[in-house]
Image: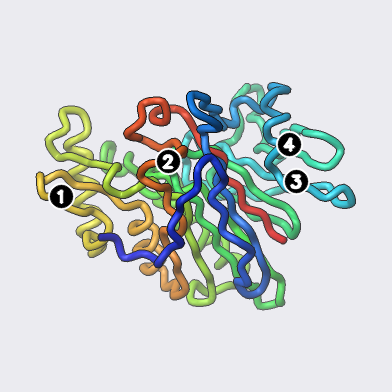
């Protein structure tokens, strides 16, 4: 089994998985995961590609916290590409106002292109938040305090491709500056003058590890799975990350991988695998036992500083 934090047992039906406000030194945040299934036979995909649709905006208004006296900004990285990139919040310049109290901010559009800048992570300013759609890809929150005493909070989408740069294995060259989004977050913290030993990292809402199978005999991805296995073996990360089943299938624990990558940087305070998605329930994830909740259907994940 993965070596991860003891987590509350989730026994909710069509209600958000919620991690209550945490005193994490030096501040607090809340996280929520809203399920894709709203009622029997009703699946409501939370993919943020629908942001320009008025019906989807109304759904967001119904779940995002608000204060009439404070305008909330929710930063929404372009997680579909799973780029492993951290992007400064001021570069989230594509604005989607929901009403007079809430605006969704997405990364800037590329020059003369309809595509947004790719990113998995950003900073969350005080009293603001981040949202993402996810089908079992974990949310990572990293926080701390700079030498000048300034509090900071980073949040990241941490899917498998965000954590492992597969092109290094398939083409022999890295495709990005950081192999993992965890590396990108640590680099950003170090740029602020913060040592990894002073960071706090938590991860939430991961796909059940035994559902993320990586078979070496797979006709399309078997060779790549072997390369991933060799990488994890080289970093002494097999225990609790790649888990062998009795039928010789191998399953990848994203929570275990996040924990091991953070440990390699020297982060001491790690809680990985909090509120992982239940095996049977209303939350979508890759290879879900319910075909309606598998594939491209997404849950809505939110983290907000308070």
Distance from disc 2 to disc 1, alpha carbons, whole Å, reads: 23 Å
Q: Is residue 49 left or right of residue 166?
A: right
The residue that label 2 is drawn on is 281
Instruction: Tell me which residue sits at (22%, 59%) in the image.
Output: 238
Circle 2: element type: loop
Instruction: Tell me which residue sits at (25%, 56%) in the image.
Output: 232
CA neighbours of label 4 inside 10 A, class few (<14), some (14 to 19), many (20+): some
Distance from disc 2 to disc 3, alpha carbons, whole Å, reads: 30 Å
In the rendered image, residue 275, in percent from the top left (x then y), is placed at 46, 56
| Label 2–label 4 contact, CB within 8 A | no
Q: Residue furthest left?
A: 247
Distance from disc 3 to disc 1, alpha carbons, whole Å, reads: 44 Å
The residue that label 3 is drawn on is 73
In the rendered image, residue 77, in percent from the top left (x then y), is placed at 59, 41
Distance from disc 1 to disc 4, alpha carbons, whole Å, reads: 43 Å
Of 139 and 10, nearer the camera is 10
Distance from disc 3 to disc 4, alpha carbons, whole Å, reads: 13 Å
The residue that label 1 is drawn on is 245
Depth-wise, is mark 3 or mark 1 nearer the camera?
1
The earlier-in-sequence mark between 2 and 3 is 3
In the rendered image, residue 85, in percent from the top left (x then y), is placed at 52, 46
The residue that label 4 is drawn on is 61
């Amino acid at each position: 089994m993965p070596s991860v934090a003891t987590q509350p047992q989730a026994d909710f039906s069509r209600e958000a998985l919620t991690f209550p406000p945490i005193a994490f030194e030096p501040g607090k945040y809340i996280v929520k995961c809203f399920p894709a299934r709203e009622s029997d036979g009703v699946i409501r995909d939370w993919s943020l590609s629908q942001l320009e649709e008025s019906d989807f905006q109304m759904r967001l208004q119904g779940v995002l916290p608000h204060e009439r006296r404070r305008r909330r900004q929710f930063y929404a990285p372009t997680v579909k590409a799973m780029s492993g990139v951290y992007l400064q919040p001021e570069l989230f310049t594509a604005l989607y106002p929901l009403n007079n109290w809430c605006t969704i901010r997405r990364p800037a559009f590329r020059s003369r292109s309809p595509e947004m800048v790719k990113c998995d992570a950003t900073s969350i300013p005080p009293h603001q938040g981040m949202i993402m759609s996810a089908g079992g890809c974990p949310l990572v929150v990293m926080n701390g305090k700079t030498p000048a005493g300034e509090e900071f909070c980073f949040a990241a989408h941490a899917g498998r491709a965000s954590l492992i740069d597969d092109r290094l294995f398939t083409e022999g060259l890295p495709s990005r500056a950081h192999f993992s989004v965890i590396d990108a977050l640590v680099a950003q913290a170090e740029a602020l003058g913060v040592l990894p030993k002073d960071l706090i990292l938590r991860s939430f809402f991961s796909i059940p590890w035994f559902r993320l199978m990586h078979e070496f005999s797979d006709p399309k991805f078997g060779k790549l799975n072997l390369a991933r296995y060799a990488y994890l073996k080289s970093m002494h990360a097999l225990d609790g990350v790649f888990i062998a089943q009795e039928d010789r299938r191998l399953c990848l624990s994203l929570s275990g991988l996040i924990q091991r990558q953070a440990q390699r940087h020297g982060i001491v305070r790690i809680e990985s695998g909090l509120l992982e998605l239940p095996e049977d329930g209303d939350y979508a994830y890759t290879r879900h036992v319910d075909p309606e909740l598998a594939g491209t259907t997404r849950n809505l994940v939110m983290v907000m500083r308070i």
